[in-house]
Image (spheres, rainbow, N blue to C red):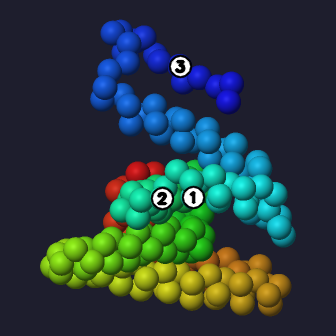
Amino acid sequence: MGQEHIVDPEFRPNGLLQQDAPELLGALLGLVETETATLADPKEEAPRGLLSLQQGWGYTSAEKDVHRAVLVNRLNRTAYDIPMLLADVDLDTDEAPEPPGIAGASVSAFAAASLLDAQEHADNGRYEHAHLALDAAEGSLAQALITLHLLRLVLRANRQHDNDAYKDATRTPLTTAWVRACLRVRYGTSHSP
């Protein structure tokens, strides 16, 4: 694809090591996903190249267990990547409200990953692990429903064309505190993992 990952000699004076493989794979994955987004833009009514993209992916993941592992990893990556949309939000201040839809989208991805994980454990007779994964999915879905409701309140206030009501709806103590707590639980004290 005409790109290369530059290795900083200050941090890696001996070059790349086996433990650097995840970072290199992440860089390759980022490049592939960026290229994919230009070919199959989800904002288009009928994304160009989406069918071919899905077919190509299908050819490389015929084994069910590998396919499931790839999907779970992708969903978890997505859940951790979503807060990158909050790059300009300081979670430690009350100045800027966090968009509840972003927190909700993140926990929804976690819920999907947990559900796939629960099913895999159940299929293999690991029922205690399946229950733990279901608990994680249920908690994430509850958080997603709350953020959905909060976003609906924001939209309702916005529809009334009252800027003060819009600001109040997005900055209520419940909204700000709850979304902050949700993001801190998932990602620590900052908005990135």
For the point 52% across and 35% down, which residue is it?
27
Q: CA distance from mark 1 to mark 3?
A: 31 Å
Which quarter of the rendering shows the N terminus? top right
Helix, strand or loop under label 3:
loop
Q: CA distance from mark 3 to mark 2?
A: 33 Å
Amino acid type, callout 2:
Ala
Amino acid type, callout 3:
Ile
18 to 105, vertically: above or below: above
Q: CA distance from mark 2 to mark 1?
A: 6 Å
Residue 118: in sight, yes or no? no
Res. 160 image quadrant = bottom right
**Dot 1 and dot 3 residues touching (CB under 8 Å):** no
Helix, strand or loop under label 1:
helix
Q: Is residue 16 left or right of residue 104?
A: left
Residue at label 1? 58
Q: Is residue 139 left or right of residue 1?
A: left
**Dot 3 and dot 2 residues touching (CB under 8 Å):** no
Q: Nearer the viewer, residue 62 or 170?
A: 62
Nearer the observer: mark 3 or 2; the answer is 2
Residue at label 3? 6
Across and down, in percent, residue 89 comes to 57, 56
Q: Is residue 59 left or right of residue 178?
A: right
Q: Nearer the viewer, residue 100 or 109?
A: 109
Across and down, in percent, residue 142 comes to 42, 86
Q: Earlier in the sequence, mark 3 or mark 2?
A: 3
Residue 110: in sight, yes or no? yes
Amino acid type, callout 1:
Gly
* Neighbour tally class for label 2: few under 14, some 14-19, many 20 plus, Cα within 10 Å: few
Give the tally of numbered discs.
3
For the point 64% across and 88% down, which residue is it?
153
Residue at label 2? 62
**Dot 2 and dot 1 residues touching (CB under 8 Å):** yes
